[in-house]
Image: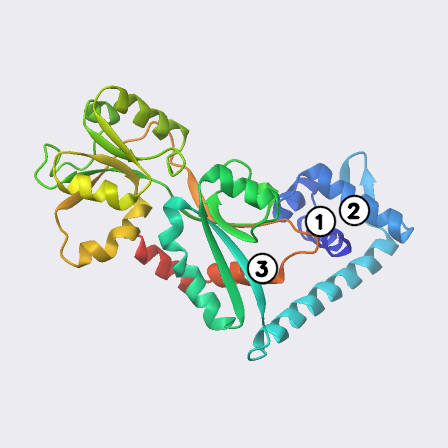
Amino acid sequence: MLARKLAYLLALAKERHYGRAAAACRVSQPALSAGIHQLEIELGFPIVKRFGQRFTGFTQAGEVVLKWAQKSADDCARLQQELRDLPGASSGMLRIGTLNSASALVSNFSVPFEEKFAGVSLTILSQNAVELQQALDDFVIDVALTYIDQNPKKYLYAQSLYREEYELLARKGSRFSGTECVTWDAIRGLPLCTLSPEMRVLDEEESGNVVEAQRQARHIVTNSVWVVIGHVRTGKWFSVLPRAVHAMIADAMAAGDDEIEAIPLVRNSPAPEVGIVVPFRDPPSALAEAFFEIATKPDVLQAFQQSMK
């Protein structure tokens, strides 16, 4: 807890504003203010100068605490780097959660992590969004690939990766072949083969569109993406899947399966954002922070973006 309060203080010193400091720490402004106030109580000295609710500077004691906070942060960073540089010194278990739709993308990050931390065992769980959030809340997983739009401030770290666009899967030569995009109205009444609710990776808007489309035509529901692909390949069925799921069938496509094409679906609202998140923990997970640091390196992110094309 002390480390987090010192981090709040350093953020306030940098931003000179409670709201901006809270945003930088990905917490609410009341939480940051309360943390700094608790630090003042624990140390027995006023640290921050205030005019009403506004930050106006630091007291003499506050300047001393700031120096120690910065030294502590620098020492912690050096310690973590030194431990990471020890060959074979890192060990333990890192639990990674991922959306079903993003499960094929995890290797973009787990591979470079394993190259640096060969002694760490990885457990990777693929779940729907509701199960994944529950696992984060229950401390079942340490880091996740999940939706980050709704409340990114609840995470210690969050890095956006992509927006989850959706596509109509069809056999080449269908009535939609050659079109740049297609609307939901245009596909209502089509026979659809879709993923079952427990596997469904569509957001609320697109899930509602799928249900409406299913009401108007015959449909198949399955928990296997390969069943979906097999039925689409026959030319008698269509499907709707996130663009990221194409990574799951990339090998088959590369092996000569060029019978299927994907046509972007037009949305009425922005697509949900998917990213890597590390939840708040006390104490924080050093392995989760190391995973996030490696996953957000420019070369790793660049390689990831290439895999999405």
- Horizontal side of 233 relative to 268 (left or right) equals left
Name the residue: 39% across, 60% down.
108
Q: CA distance from mark 2 to mark 3?
A: 23 Å
**Mark 1: few/some/many CA within 10 Å (<14, 14-19, 20+):** many
**Disc 2 from disc 1: Cα separation:** 10 Å
Of callouts 2 and 3, which one flags the residue occurring earlier in the amino acid sequence?
A: 2
- Secondary element under disc 1, as helix, strand or loop, is helix
- Tag count in the figure? 3
The residue identified by callout 3 is: 289
Tell me, yes or no, whether the two marked residues, 2 and 1, touch with CB atoms within 8 Å: yes
Q: Nearer the viewer, residue 197 or 116?
A: 197
Which residue is drawn at the image coordinates 70% and 52% (left, top)? 282
Amino acid on which disc 2 is placed = Ile
Pointer 2 or 1: first along the chain: 1
- For label 1, the residue is 12
Other residues around mark 2 within 10 Å, as few (<14) / some (14–19) / many (≥20):
many
> In the drawing, what numbered circle is on residue 36?
2
Q: Quadrant of residue 109?
A: bottom left
Residue 290 higher or lower than 7, as above or below: below
Taking the image as shown, residue 278 lies to the left or right of residue 272, namely right
Circle 3 — which element?
A: helix
Residue 205 occupies which quadrant of the picture?
A: top left
- Note whether 43 is above or below 203 in the view shown: below
Rounded to the nearest angstrom, the CA distance separating label 1 from label 3 is: 22 Å
Badge 3 crowding class, 10 Å Cα cut-off, few under 14, some 14 to 19, many 20 or more, is some
